[in-house]
Amino acid sequence: VATGAPERGPGTEAGVAALDEFSLIARYFDRPGAERQGVGDDCALIDVGGTTLALTSDMLVEGVHFLPGADPRLLGHKALAVNLSDLAAAGARPRCFLLALALPRADESWLAAFSRGLFALAAEHDCTLIGGDTTRTPPAQAGGAQRGPLTICITAIGEVAVATYCGRAGARPGDDIWVSGCLGEAALGLAMRRGEIDCDAMEIAPSHRDACLLRMDRPTPRVALGRALAGCATACIDVSDGLVGDLGHILARSGVGAELRWADIPRPGWIQNLDIATQHRTVLAGGDDYELLFCARAADRTRVAALAAPELAVSRIGTIESAPGLRLRNGDGTLLKTTLQAYDHFASGP
Ligand code: ADP
Ligand code: MG
């Protein structure tokens, strides 16, 4: 999801622009290849020797994914975390990564803090920096165009057990839908930072506010859970663009529909003090939580529930159905009408 761009709320029109982000990719970049199909999943898989590698690439762009002046240590963490999150969705064990940087200037205190944040997370996951590229962004133009934005692109490489790999296409009617952790905090953090939520007026405790900002700035990739799901999940994706949109990718690729139960979707208890539209927007369509959203056979319910840890819950939030589309059910059984959509980098622009 993007930080610098306007958020798309309930009822937001898809826009008159011809091409959304995913149609753009499908039309111009999705080509059948000799390697295992990759476009459309969180990672691409390639067979090398006796192992299968999972590869993913994610970019952070100043003014789009983070605001100018963002804490470089947190940026270093987040740039790698969002990539490790894609490896987690593929059930991969992180191995190494490449780092491409376009920097406005060689600012040593920025670089020291950025690399500290980057390498701390890399060490946690035993993931080695093996190469990359470093360039300077174009200078500011006399006509007023600003210096090119700071851009960080990481390509991460992991290893998967291909026999148990699931991707996004394996969900079947009757499967349970699960999600790890809790949803909505990162989007609430972003809304707070943008001044869209007045914490004082809404009596949101400082500890809750800090937790939301931390979720936004310092996501935790669910690598261990992703690996533990191997052989158990039928489909998996990480929640980067919002629950409804990311589940939509599983549904589209699996050729199924789903019902979600609003009451069962994990979210911080205090958000019930916010108006229901804000609750829906942040929990259902807020991105950047980097939790894992996955499907599993109902027969594996006990096995999945046993993966819950004190620091990371797993919640059963719905069911895969054969009828296409996504239905959201309220606690009282009525259907919730919503036009919420995932963040799309091109949906609202020319
Ligand atoms: P994620 O959020 O999991 O990183 P994205 O939503 O960014 O995935 O991308 C969706 C799919 O499209 C992924 O499989 C990704 O590898 C692929 N993709 C995105 N951009 C391109 C591109 N320029 N060329 C080829 N494939 C792309
Ligand atoms: Mg992903």
Image: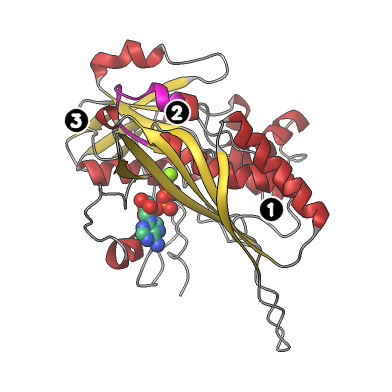
User: The residue tagged with tag 3: helix, strand or loop?
Assistant: loop
Q: Is residue 267 left or right of residue 246?
A: right
Q: Where 72 sits versus 86, above or below?
A: below
- Residue assigned mark 2: 265
The circle on residue 173 is 3
Crowding at dot 3, Cα within 10 Å, few <14 / some 14-19 / many 20+, comes out as some
Of badges 1 and 3, the one in the foreground is 3
Figure quarter occupied by ligand 2 = top left
Of callouts 1 and 3, which one flags the residue occurring earlier in the amino acid sequence? 3
Cβ atoms under marks 1 and 3 closer than 8 Å: no
The circle on residue 330 is none
**Type of the residue with mark 3:** Pro
Crowding at dot 1, Cα within 10 Å, few <14 / some 14-19 / many 20+, comes out as few
**Residue at point 71% right, 78% down?**
139
Give the spatial CA distance, label 1 vs label 2. Answer: 25 Å
User: The residue tagged with tag 2: helix, strand or loop?
Assistant: loop
